[in-house]
Every structure is written in C-alpha cells, then in structure tokens.
C-alpha cells in the first residue's frame, strides 16, 4: 500500500478490494497416476484469507478445472474482504484444493489443500507495509527524488525515517501525478514509484544483501527495507545484478501489484 497524507484507510470500516490476474499452465500433470488427483478428478482454485491476531479465517472458491480444461490464462481473481473482521495483519493465499477424492496413493480426502500459488501479507495497523511518500513545496526542486538514510537495510524499517520517496507538489508536472485522487494510483505515479524502487533496490544490492532466494532473505527483519525490496523482486528468476533486467522486472512487478488501482 501507499502512505499518502491526504488519504487514510481504516479497515475497521473500509472494505479491502483484492484484484490480481494469474496464469496457471501445464495443470494436466496434476492428474493421473503420477499426479495429485485421479485422471477423471477435479481441482479447485480458491482463496484463503486469515489473521492470527483477530483469530479469523475464511475460504472462498474461485474456480475449478479438470485435466482436459484449457489452461487458466490471465484469470482474474477479484473479491472484497469486508471491513471490521480483521485487525493487525491479514494473509491472503491463492490455493489449489481437491474437489474430488484424490489419487489412491495419497491417503487424504476431498477438500485437501494441494498447495498455494501465492501468499501476500498485509499490515493493517502500523506503517511497516507502506511506501513512505513525503511532500514538498519548492518550485526550485525536481518533481521527485529518493532519500536513503538507513544504516542496516536488513533491520531498519521501510519507514520515512530511513527511506522515502519525496514529491514536489510545486513542480509544473506534479498535476500529472494526480495525488488528490488517492488511493487510486495514476500511471505517472506508478512510473515514479517504479523508478524510486529501482534506486532503493540497486542500493540494497550494492550493499551486498543477498536477495536471490527466500532462504537467503530469512534473516531480514519483518518490515525491513531489505524484506520490502525482496518482496518486489521475489518473482525475478534472472540475474538481479543486471541493471537492465532489474529495471524491467521491477516495472513489471510494480504494475502487477498496483493493477486495478
């Protein structure tokens, strides 16, 4: 989410709208003797969202498919979580589960969760999940810049005390950012955030924090700058040290995560 001083999200009252597109190919390998369900079986696609802090958990069925079903390509996952049910943190998981009894060599039953395609954690209270944006009013300054003031990216939080995107409202191009339309994110603001995140990621990588796999990021403090950067880079399979690849993939990651905003 964004931290923007003209908008306040209150999950005790406001609904949370989750929207994402996914592609799931080669699903036929999940069926048959070597698969997870029988040749004639059926697998479901669902979403599970829960919060340990509020001791709440819900599951919603999104779709189902068989071996001969066409691949799920650019499937839109779209639902609303009503406000007032959760506090603290909420985790949203996109899961696969068995609609029919699964293959004989697995002693489990209908409804068994076979795995998760994605897991996203939202911080509903506090600032650990926000992208800190500070505003300035100076016609002599550029439209935007980034301040990186952390000492240890693995510990220092993703907070304006340590890192921030600074936006100059007095710049002639500031109107194109459409800041007053928050929480909607304009195309130009998405590109500014992409560029800012690229600068932050480059600095973290240059400081030799290893962001190559989940195992390598396990020592990062939750809510830290390094963990926030690794979240945006987790789907990049190519060389993260390449500036060209990093810039391209961060742009793709940011636009996917802000899709629908």
Image: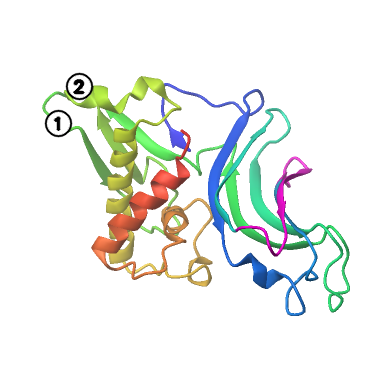
Residues 248 and 21: in front is 21
- What segment carries the magenta color? 49-70
- Residue 57 point in image, percent of width and height: 77, 44
Please tell me which of labels 2 and 1 falls first in the chain: 1
Residue 76 among magenta residues: no
Picture residue at 32% right of the left edge, 24% below the top:
178
Q: How far apart are the two marked residues, 2 and 1, measured between alpha carbons?
A: 8 Å
Q: Are marks 2 and 1 in contact (CB under 8 Å)?
A: yes
Q: Which mark is residue 163?
A: none
State the image coordinates of residue 88 (x, y, percent, origin top left).
Answer: 65, 40
Q: How many marks?
A: 2
Q: Out of 136 and 43, give the one closest to the viewer.
A: 43
Q: Quadrant of residue 35?
A: bottom right
Q: For numbered disc 1, what is the local secondary structure?
A: loop
Q: Provide residue 33's location: percent of width, then percent of height.
A: 77, 79
**Left or right for 147, reference 114:** left
Q: Dot 2 corresponds to which residue?
A: 170
Whether residue 130 appears in this view of the structure is yes
Residue visible at 48% across and 71% down in the picture: 216
Q: Nearer the viewer, residue 153 or 74?
A: 74
The answer to whether one can see residue 150 in this image is no
Q: Is residue 20 above or below residue 6?
A: below
Return the x and y of residue 118 as percentages of the image width and height: 59, 56
Name the residue carrying label 1: 141
């Amino acid at each position: 989410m964004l931290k923007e001083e003209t908008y306040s999200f209150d999950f005790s009252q406001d609904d949370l709208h989750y929207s994402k597109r996914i592609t799931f190919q080669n699903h036929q390998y999940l069926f048959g003797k070597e698969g997870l369900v029988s040749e004639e079986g059926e697998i479901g696609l669902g979403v599970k969202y829960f919060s340990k802090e509020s001791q709440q958990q819900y599951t919603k069925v999104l779709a189902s498919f068989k071996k001969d079903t066409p691949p799920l390509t650019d499937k839109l996952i779209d639902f609303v979580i009503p406000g007032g049910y959760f506090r603290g943190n909420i985790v949203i998981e996109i899961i696969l589960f068995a609609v029919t009894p699964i293959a004989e060599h697995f002693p489990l039953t209908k409804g068994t969760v076979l795995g998760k395609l994605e897991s996203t954690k939202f911080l509903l209270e506090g600032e650990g999940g926000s992208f800190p944006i500070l505003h300035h009013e100076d016609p002599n300054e550029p439209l935007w810049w980034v301040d990186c003031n952390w000492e240890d990216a693995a510990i220092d939080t993703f907070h304006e005390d340590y890192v921030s995107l600074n936006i100059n409202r007095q710049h002639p191009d500031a109107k194109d950012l459409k800041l007053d339309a928050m929480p909607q994110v304009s195309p130009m603001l998405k590109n500014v955030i992409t560029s800012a995140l690229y600068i932050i990621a480059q600095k973290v990588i240059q400081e030799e924090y290893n962001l190559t796999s989940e195992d390598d990021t396990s020592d990062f403090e939750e809510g830290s700058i390094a963990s926030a950067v690794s979240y945006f880079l987790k789907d990049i399979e190519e060389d993260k040290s390449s500036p060209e690849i990093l810039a391209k993939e961060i742009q793709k990651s940011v636009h996917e995560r802000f899709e629908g905003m």
